[in-house]
Amino acid sequence: MEYVDGTTKTVVKSVKPLPIMVVGYFFGKRYHLYRWFAVSAVIVGVTMFLLGFETKGKNKKYDETMIEIGIMWSLVALVMDGFVGSTQDNVRKKYKPSASALMLSSNLCALIISLFTDLVYSGEFSKAIEFQQKYPEVIWELMIASIANPFGNHFIFLMVSEFGALQCALVTTVRKFLTILVNSMWLGRWFTPFQILAVVGVFMGLLADSYVSEQEKRKELAAKQAKDDQKKKQ
């Protein structure tokens, strides 16, 4: 993210649900056409709303080569998000792990990879130790963050285990949007017509997604009930 400007960061942070759907398609996951439209409406709405703030500020000048590198890594990150979400959905469907089990296994794998890259490749581990030795007061704040972070992660993995990776990504995207929206209203900022249209688009997309989700649940319950009735007859 250090290689890209604010506008690119905004777009990357807003479109995370989309790669989950695209990569999930290649994993055999099929979404209703209405869900594609609903999720796209939310993504476009959030992006438009956030870009309304980006255009008001002064943009930092970035070298073209740096921007190209940043965009490349941003695309890689989005593709990886898609694979992570699709893998989580497959694990959830096949093994039905609890939120704690999913969180533990994911964090253990992340720890092993992070230790390897930090110790062998980047050398960031030694830099982190040096930083803490230079500024020991930061250790207390790191401890608080280390305690608070697992609680937040638990609710994220709970959402994944109960509702799936797509819904989790959609909720986190909307959460960022609502945080900025409420904060802006609290500070008395005026929204442009462009941003008001974006807000309408987000809520329309959320309503459409809720409707599609409810219809899918009803179909699943009806199919399950039909199976149970057939077994009873036999």
Image (cartoon, grey):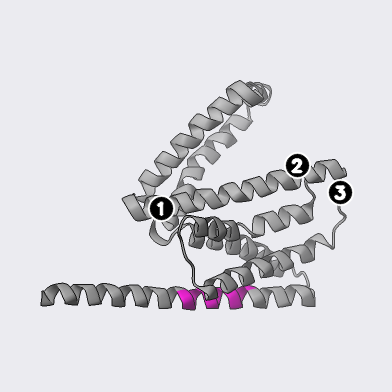
x 39%, y 50%: residue = 91
Check disc 1 and report the residue beneath it: 90
User: Which of the labelled discs sits on residue 212, or is there none?
Assistant: none
Q: Is residue 150 visible?
A: yes
Q: Which residue is drawn at 75% across and 42% down?
A: 2
Q: In which quarter of the image is the N terminus?
A: top right
Frontmost residue, 87 versus 188: 87
Residue 132 seen anywhere in this rendered image of the structure: no
Magenta stretch, main secondary structure class: helix
Task: List the single residue furthest toward the left.
Answer: 234
Q: Identify which residue is drawn at 19% across, 73% down.
A: 228
Give x and y (percent) for residue 85: 50, 52
Q: In this view, does 186 lie above or below 151?
A: below
Three-letter code, disc 2: Glu
| Image point (65%, 59%), residue name | 14
Vertical order, 219 against 73 (above or below): below
The residue that label 2 is drawn on is 2
Q: Are marks 3 and 1 in contact (CB under 8 Å)?
A: no
- The mark found on residue 60 in the picture is 3
Task: Report the magenta residues as a range.
Answer: 202-212
Mark 3 and mark 2: Cα distance apart in space = 11 Å
Please tell me which of labels 3 and 1 falls first in the chain: 3
Q: Nearer the viewer, residue 155 or 234?
A: 234
Q: Which amino acid does label 3 sit on?
A: Lys
